[in-house]
Amino acid sequence: MREPRSEDGCPDVSLKVIEVDGETAKGGADRLRHGVGRHGNALDREILDEANVAATETIVAVSNDDEVNVLSSLLAKRYGAKRAVTLINNSSYGPLVSSLGIDVVVSPRDVTVSTILQHVRRGRIRAVHSIRDGLAEVIEAEALETSPLMGTPLREVKLPAGIIVGAIVRGDDVIIPHGDTVIQTKDRVIILATAGQVKKVEKLFSVSLEFF
């Protein structure tokens, strides 16, 4: 659990680890400079009270049991936690769990697929996240001088259907693009693309021989 702390020179977060295995709880807390380990069950109201769940900003449930993760997240939110991040191994649970009020569902399968895709995708692709069981991908790509997107307002760029430019990261600024937006060299472009159009995104950010 993550709990806000004061600004009197102390860290801005306080971590509390709840673990049914005593040795694991102690070991986990020892690795955290500002963490406290608690031996107990996250489904136990008394343990949640001891962890001050009512003042908790975020609970992160990452046990090996999906049901425990879901129930502990829901209990923590019921007792005052503002946000829940929940590990779900069974991807079919995802849509159901989200509808229950859990804020973020993390699937190891999706994370693994996204990591693999980042290495497989061609062009200046910086990051890839697969969504909806591979129906689409969120892609972060670096714009180079040779990209056909460069120097032209987005309204004049003939993007294929199924490709949407969602955001542009330029230095420390995040730009929500509109028709007049012009992509510049070294911009990081966030794109949503359906599965059938991903190869076209790769081509948009590929490095041509003229670049070298």
Image (tube, rainbow, N blue to C red):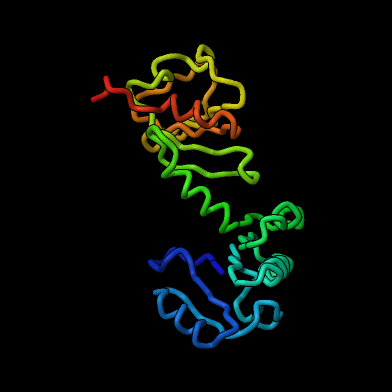
User: Is residue 173 among the parts visible in the rendering?
Assistant: no
Residue 207 image point, x, y percent: 34, 27
Q: Residue at x 47, y 48 (%)?
A: 116
Residue 7 occupies quadrant: bottom left
Q: Residue at x 60, y 37 (%)?
A: 136
In the image, residue 133 sits, relative to residue 19, either above or below, namely: above
In the image, residue 19 sits, relative to residue 85, either above or below, namely: below
Q: Nearer the viewer, residue 169 or 202?
A: 202
Q: Is residue 196 left or right of residue 102?
A: left
Residue 179 occupies quadrant: top right
Image quadrant in which the N terminus is located: bottom right
Q: Residue at x 65, y 81 (%)?
A: 41
User: Is residue 49 among the parts visible in the rendering?
Assistant: yes
Query: Which residue is outermost to the top?
Result: 156
Q: Nearer the viewer, residue 120 or 72?
A: 120
Residue 86 occupies quadrant: bottom right
In the image, residue 174 sits, relative to residue 12, either above or below, namely: above
Residue 98 image point, x, y percent: 71, 54
Residue 178 image point, x, y percent: 54, 21
Residue 101 image point, x, y percent: 73, 56
Q: Residue at x 53, y 53 (%)?
A: 111
Image quadrant in which the C terminus is located: top left
